[in-house]
C-alpha cells in the first residue's frame, strides 16, 4: 500500500512540473559567411554586419529538462553608392547592393535550473536547419529633386544563390517569472553550419501553461 501511495505522489509531483510553453524573442544577430560579389566595375560587397532578429518558440518542460522547437528570421546587407553627376536639380548615382536573408528552424533539448522560485537558468544544445537566400545587384539612378522623378539604368545582376543546410546551436539564458506563468528573459546563442556561423543576443517573453 505504501509503495502505491509513493508512486502516486511521485506521479503527481512530476505532472506538476511538466508544462508546455510558448514564447517570442527579439534581438541582434551577427553573421559571418563567405557570400560576396565583385561587380564589373571592381566594387566588392560582403554582407557581414549585425542586424535585428525576431522569432518564436514552443516547447514542453518536464521537470529540469525539456524539448523546444524555434523559428528565427534575420538578415545581413551591404551597400555602396557614388555620385556620378550632379547638375541641380538632377543627380545621378551608382548604387551597389547585396542582401543575405536567413530563416532558421531549431530543435533542441533544454535544461532548466531554478536559482529560486522567480529566477531560472535555461541552456540548450541542438540542431538547426537554415535557409539562406543571397542576392546582389547594381544600377544607376537618376533623380530630379524638384519633380521627385526617378529613372533606373545600367542594371547589373550580381551573384544570386539559395541554399539550405543543417547545423548545430548552443544557447544559454536566464528567465525571470514576473507572474506565475509569464517569464521575461535574455539569452545568447552560437550557431554554425557549412555556410555560415552566427551569434545572437535575444530578449524574450514566455508563457508556461
Image (cartoon, rainbow, N blue to C red):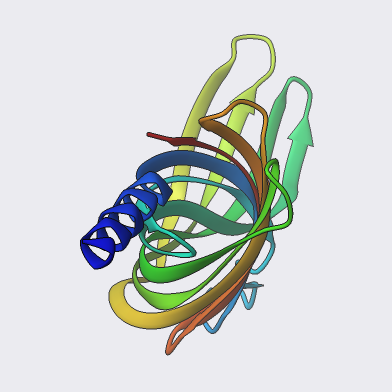
Figure disc tally: 0
Q: In this view, does 12 lie to the left or right of 64?
A: left
Please name whichever residue, 96 or 88, is drawn nearer the observer in this view of the structure.
96
Q: In this view, does 18 lie to the left or right of 111?
A: left
> As drawn, which residue projects farthest toward the bottom?
194
* Closest to the observer, 192 or 177: 177
Q: Which residue lies furthest to the top in this view?
A: 147
Q: Is residue 101 visible?
A: yes
Vertical placement of 138 versus 119: above or below? below
Return the residue nearer the eye: 58 or 191. 58
Rendered location of residue 158, percent (x, y)? 42, 69
Could you tell me which residue is drawn at 44 percent across and 53 percent down?
A: 72
Q: In which quarter of the image is the C terminus?
A: top left
Q: Where is residue 149 drawn, in percent x and y?
A: 53, 18
Looking at the picture, how far across and down is residue 126, in whole percent?
41, 77
Res. 146 image quadrant: top right
Residue at image coords 59%, 69% = 171
Q: Residue at x 27, y 56 (%)?
A: 5
> Residue 56, image x and y in percent?
42, 44
Amino acid at each position: 500500500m505504501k509503495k502505491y501511495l509513493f508512486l502516486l505522489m511521485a506521479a503527481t509531483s512530476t505532472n506538476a512540473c511538466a508544462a508546455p510553453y510558448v514564447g517570442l524573442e527579439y534581438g541582434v544577430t551577427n553573421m559571418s559567411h563567405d557570400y560576396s560579389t565583385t561587380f564589373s566595375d571592381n566594387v566588392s560587397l560582403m554582407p557581414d554586419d549585425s542586424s535585428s532578429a525576431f522569432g518564436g518558440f514552443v516547447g514542453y518542460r518536464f521537470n529540469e529538462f525539456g524539448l523546444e522547437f524555434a523559428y528565427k528570421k534575420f538578415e545581413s546587407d551591404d551597400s555602396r553608392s557614388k555620385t556620378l553627376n550632379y547638375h541641380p536639380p538632377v543627380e545621378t548615382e551608382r548604387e551597389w547592393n547585396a542582401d543575405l536573408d536567413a530563416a532558421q528552424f531549431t530543435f533542441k533539448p533544454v535544461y532548466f535550473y531554478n536559482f529560486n522560485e522567480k529566477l531560472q537558468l535555461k541552456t540548450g544544445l541542438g540542431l538547426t536547419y537554415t535557409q539562406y537566400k543571397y542576392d546582389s545587384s547594381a544600377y544607376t539612378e537618376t533623380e530630379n529633386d524638384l519633380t521627385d522623378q526617378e529613372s533606373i539604368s545600367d542594371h547589373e545582376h550580381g551573384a544570386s544563390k539559395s541554399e539550405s543546410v543543417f547545423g548545430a546551436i548552443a544557447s544559454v539564458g536566464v528567465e525571470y517569472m514576473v507572474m506565475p506563468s509569464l517569464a521575461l528573459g535574455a539569452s545568447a546563442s552560437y550557431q554554425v553550419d557549412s555556410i555560415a556561423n552566427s551569434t545572437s543576443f535575444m530578449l524574450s517573453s514566455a508563457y508556461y501553461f
